């Protein structure tokens, strides 16, 4: 009613999930050059594991809240040396927090 368009791109064999590569192809076809995803750990992890992320923007606050959710639900690497390495592009103080831009 507000003028938005709903596009359904279900993932084959994965009910209730979106085919993320197909979604990005459709957005590219529509000349969308940049997509920002602010999501929970499962969707963030799905984008990362599909190889669809080239930047991560993280904010770190100097306080501890105890146990919580990981920022991205990804399959653990076989060893620390097998983990995907991101490169720190910038790290800037922002108020009392730290803004870190990582690139693949």
Image (tube, rainbow, N blue to C red):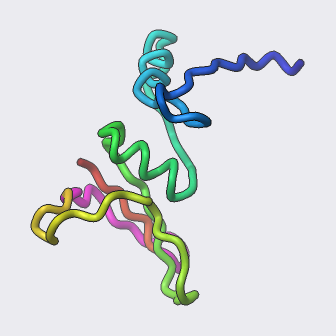
Q: Residue at x 44, y 72 (%)?
A: 98
Vertical placement of residue 67 versus 32, above or below = below
Q: Is residue 93 left or right of residue 103?
A: right
Q: Is residue 9 left or right of residue 81?
A: right
Considering every residue shown, the one lying at the far top of the view is 29
Percent position (x, y) of residue 68? 55, 78
Q: Residue at x 63, y 20 (%)?
A: 8
Considering every residue shown, the one lying at the far left of the view is 81
Q: Nearer the viewer, residue 18 or 5?
A: 18
Percent position (x, y) of residue 7? 64, 18
Q: Is residue 31 magenta?
A: no
Percent position (x, y) of residue 33? 43, 23
Q: Residue at x 50, y 76 (%)?
A: 97
- Which portion, as a residue range, is magenta? 85-97
Q: Nearer the viewer, residue 46 or 58?
A: 46
User: Which quarter of the figure has residue 101?
Assistant: bottom left
Q: Residue at x 34, y 66 (%)?
A: 91
What secondary structure is the magenta-colored segment mainly? strand
Percent position (x, y) of residue 28? 44, 16
Vertical placement of residue 47 versus 76, above or below = above
Q: Is residue 90 magenta?
A: yes
Vertical placement of residue 50 versus 73, above or below = above
Q: Nearer the viewer, residue 41 or 98?
A: 41
Considering every residue shown, the one lying at the far front of the view is 13
How many circles with numbers are drawn on the protein? Answer: 0
Q: Quadrant of the N terminus?
A: top right
Vertical placement of residue 12 versus 58, above or below = above
């Amino acid at each position: 009613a507000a003028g938005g368009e709903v596009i359904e791109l279900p993932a084959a064999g994965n009910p209730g999930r979106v085919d993320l590569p197909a979604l990005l192809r459709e957005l590219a076809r529509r000349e969308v050059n940049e997509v920002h995803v602010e999501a929970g750990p499962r969707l963030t992890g799905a984008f990362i594991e599909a190889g669809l992320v080239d930047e991560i923007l993280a904010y770190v606050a100097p306080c501890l809240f105890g146990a919580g959710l990981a920022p991205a639900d990804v399959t653990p690497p076989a060893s620390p040396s097998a983990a995907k390495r991101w490169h720190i592009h910038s790290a800037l103080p922002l108020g009392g927090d730290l803004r870190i831009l990582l690139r693949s």
